[in-house]
Image: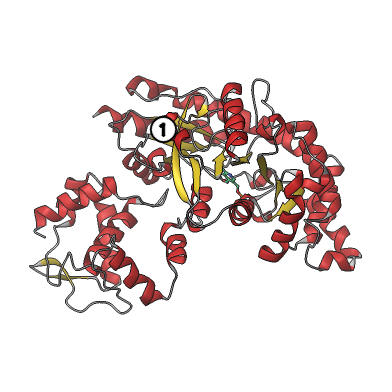
Amino acid sequence: MESLTISEWLLTELKQHRFPAGMPAHRRVYELIRRAIASQHLTAGTRLPSTRSLSEALSLSRNTILAAFEQLHDEGYIVSRTGSGTCVATTPPEGFIELDDAQSNAGMDALHRSLGLSKRGMLAAGLADHPSHEVQPFAPGEDDFSTFPTQLWRRLLNKQWRAPQPAHLDYGHAGGHLPLRRAIANYLRMSRAVNLTVEQVLITAGTQQSIDLCARMLTDHGDRVWVENPCYWGARRLLEVNGLQLHPVTVDDEGMAPNNADFRRPPRLIYTTPSHQYPKGVVMSYGRRRLLLDYAASQDSWILEDDYDSEFRFEGRPLSSLQGMDQNGRVLYLGTFSKVMYPGIKLGYLVVPPDLAESFKRGLYELQRPGQVVIQAALAEFIEEGHFASHIRRLRQIYAERRRLLQKALAPVTRVGARLPPAGSGLHLVVELPPHADDVRVADLAAEQGLRVYPLSSYGVGDKVEKGLIVGYAYAATERIAPYGRILADVIQAALSY
Ligand SMILES: Cc1ncc(COP(=O)(O)O)c(C=O)c1O
């Protein structure tokens, strides 16, 4: 590749390659060049364009290119020579993996063999996001841990440890600690109109594990699954790694919107987030709920309802769960304690139709060998003593205020063609950008200002890709929301105005 071609190729790849959400720009440039060297598209001795010319050609800051080059240099992929610029190294670095073509099967197979991973393992590792542990303001999915009542939680945990029952130290055999299952059943009946008995509730290690269990218990390799487009990456990955065929279904203002072509080949599973579509934030309409339920019943499909943040509804009357409207036992309801308690608690729940309860309980034990009964017992008391409900009320007030401040600070972006769709729930909002906008670049520009927002396009499945930014408001302190929001608004306005 000649210098000019390298810049052009990088520009195209940066736009088209599917990178993990939130991957910084320097890492993307590094990854593309590294793969090109490994696949010998860039051969030993090839001269790379200068950092200045690449920065201009790719519209990225020089520091971004320098950071990518620095890493390639440190790992031995490239060398710098005074007078002749930067070239691909003649001796490949240790651990260097040669690929025919990073995208081709042959290339992937070579990689599998050299690492000893299965295709499934490669899929999990290759698609995995590597979130930086340095959480930055506006990162979607991050909670405000400072509000968590740690002293109270410690007291409840200590109480369990003072005289632990032997069963609390064993594996969890029975689908979870019974008092916790009872507390969850009461909570869901009251607050989400879920139709259930305690027997239908299983305690899992969070939504990820619930989805994995559903995929293993209800599908076989190659089965078809409908996912929303755009889709929550956590669900998408688990479904793909389980060997399912993902069929993207468009999301419109009423939620998941299957059309006649979609209906032609019924899926085994339908994964959906009806209360607050992730990431677009839409609430599924009553009509759409009926449509999905009737279709699932007529085709014997299962619906996975991921109700991940329904606790945070700030305006309007909450629509009840899809499960609560289901007359035919086709819905499996998934909830998590990640958002209200803290993500590291790794506890969630799965409500299955009555006929599946016993098989799922056995499957959970055989496939995932659950435990953490002491924490489950403390959590049951946390809920039963009313702390869970009051913590939700408190968080709801805090997050509603943060949302209001963020919406106000971002309002100017509507002048340059961005849209702020109204939405009254959840922990993030969406700034919709026009189709020509490069949302990855806008997210990178925000990252340069210390703000981490996710490009909507990175959640796309299939051909239809929408542009926008996913902005989380739960993590940043209330008094910082307006100033950070103004910085983000400036970044968006500048990016869209030229
Ligand atoms: C759509 C959706 N579902 C579920 C979760 C929570 O998953 P877990 O319980 O595995 O932490 C998240 C977390 O961000 C999410 O965005």
The residue at 70%/38% (across/down) is 329
Q: Which residue is mark 1?
A: 261
Asked if residue 339 lies left or right of residue 252, the reply is right
- 346, 417: nearer the viewer: 346
Residue 425 appears in the picture as rendered: no
Amino acid, disc 1: Ala
Q: How is the image coloured?
A: secondary structure
- The quadrant in which residue 491 appears is top left
Image quarter in which the C terminus is found = top left
The residue at 60%/28% (across/down) is 289
Q: Residue 46, position in %: x, y? A: 12, 67
Could you say whether the residue bearing mark 1 is in a helix, strand or loop? helix
Q: Is residue 485 above or below residue 232?
A: above
Image quarter in which the N terminus is found = bottom left
Q: Is mark 1 within 8 Å of ligand 1?
A: no
Within 10 angstroms of label 1, few (less than 14), some, or many (20 or more) residues? few
